[in-house]
Amino acid sequence: MCMEKVNDCLYVQRVKAGDIQAFGMIVAKYGKMVFTIVRKIVENREDAEDITQEVFIRVFKSLERFREESEFSTWLYRIAYNTTMSELRKKKLFLVSSDSNTLIDNNLFADEKDDEIEIKLQYLEKALKKLPPDEIFLVTLHYMDGQSIECISKITDLSVSNVKVKLHRIRRKLAVEIGKLMQNE
């Protein structure tokens, strides 16, 4: 068992035993990551902050139901995903992705020069804004947060093969959109 999982389990057990300050350790450890994921999906920083806060409220209220059968981070991502999607449906929030530089499929920019890559990254930024929330979430988890396909499968309740197919289709969609943007310039 890895040290990180031990620490997470220890914090969870301490919170369940009534140590509220241990929950602060959980928020300190995962707060930035949750905010980053939410912020990649919603346009407004204040909305992302509100949703992040709602995620941790839900985590706190649901902690008794966490069975420690999966990684705590996977469980937390699941709550973040469900909360964000729920808030998007409620408020019909607009989407944005503000840091596309970390979404680089090696095949997307094969044999490109540095200045050409920079231009394509700008197009990628525009293309990402056109994705629906669930696709932005998958892209964020896999490319920007480095989550494995298996972990994403658990978070989203999609099969491993479905996650792979969706990521492949998203990459193709982005490549087509970037091509259209380049033609229009």
Image (cartoon, rainbow, N blue to C red):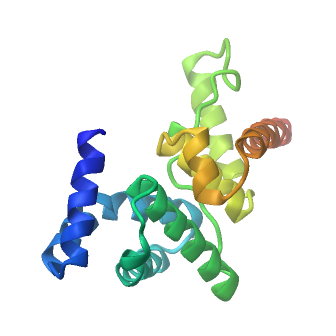
Question: Number of marks in the image?
Answer: 0
Point 22% across, 53% down: residue: 7
Q: Is residue 85 left or right of residue 48?
A: right
Tell me the quadrant of the picture where the N terminus can be found: top left
Please say whether residue 130 is visible from this viewpoint.
Answer: yes
Tell me the quadrant of the picture where the C terminus can be found: top right
Please say whether residue 49 is visible from this viewpoint.
Answer: no
Is residue 182 depicted above or below 114 in this figure?
below
Point 57% across, 31% down: residue: 118
Picture quadrant where residue 108 is located: top right
Point 67% across, 51% down: residue: 128
Is residue 33 depicted above or below 169 in this figure?
below
Picture quadrant where residue 119 is located: top right
Q: Position of residue 131 (x, y in %)?
A: 74, 57
Q: Position of residue 77 (x, y in %)?
A: 49, 61
Picture quadrant where residue 93 is located: bottom right
Q: Nearer the viewer, residue 128 or 89?
A: 89
Is residue 78 depicted above or below 143 in this figure?
below
Q: Position of residue 41 (x, y in %)?
A: 58, 64
Residue reaching furthest to the top: 111
Is residue 9 depicted above or below 149 in this figure?
below
Q: Is residue 124 left or right of residue 1?
A: right
Point 52% across, 55% down: residue: 98
